[in-house]
Amino acid sequence: MERTTTRLHNRRALMIETHTFTSTGGAELIIEPSSYFGQRFSDGHRNVQVSAKDLGGGSFTVSYRPVGAPAFVEHIAGATENDAVMLAGPEAPVFDALKIAFAGVPVAPATQSIIVNTWPRGL
């Protein structure tokens, strides 16, 4: 997994973090606090943008797990490599984990890349 930090704007620093995760053969990917540097999304960078590469014509579905909830809630289904799925802004749900499911992607040993950009809510 990669982690980078980028600063934008001269007057006000906006911290954007980019995290890259991989899945092999379309295996479901769950991004829990343990795989996200031990922190919950609800503790810091609450805005996310999720995109994918190497889907081979397939698609992906983004779900989130609300804080304290036992199950995931589907957010956007059928996204492709041309899409960016957002959970951002004041009306977005507060969540502590993400789930990425794939459909129609090449089987192993093919690898899919999920890119998650995060930034603090309210900026």
Image (tube, rainbow, N blue to C red):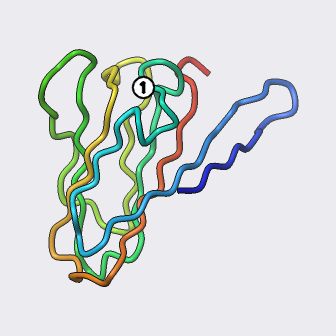
Residue 100 place in picture, x, y as percent: 26, 52
Taking the spot 17% from the left edge, 19% from the top edge, the residue there is 69
**Label 1: how many Cα within 10 Å (few below 14, some 14–19, many 20+):** some
- Count the numbered circles shown: 1
Taking the spot 52% from the left edge, 36% from the top edge, the residue there is 37
- Residue furthest out toward the left: 71
Image quadrant of residue 25? bottom left
Q: Is 3 on the left or on the right of 12, as rendered?
A: left
Q: Which residue is mark 1?
A: 40
- Residue furthest out toward the right: 10
Q: Is 65 on the left or on the right of 85, as rendered?
A: left
The secondary element bearing badge 1 is classed as loop
Frontmost residue, 3 versus 16: 3
Q: Is 70 on the left or on the right of 33, as rendered?
A: left
Frontmost residue, 93 versus 101: 101
Taking the spot 67% from the left edge, 49% from the top edge, the residue there is 4
Residue 79 place in picture, x, y as percent: 26, 60
Residue flagged by tag 1: what amino acid is it? Arg
Q: Is 120 on the left or on the right of 53, as rendered?
A: right
Quadrant of the drawing holding the C terminus: top right
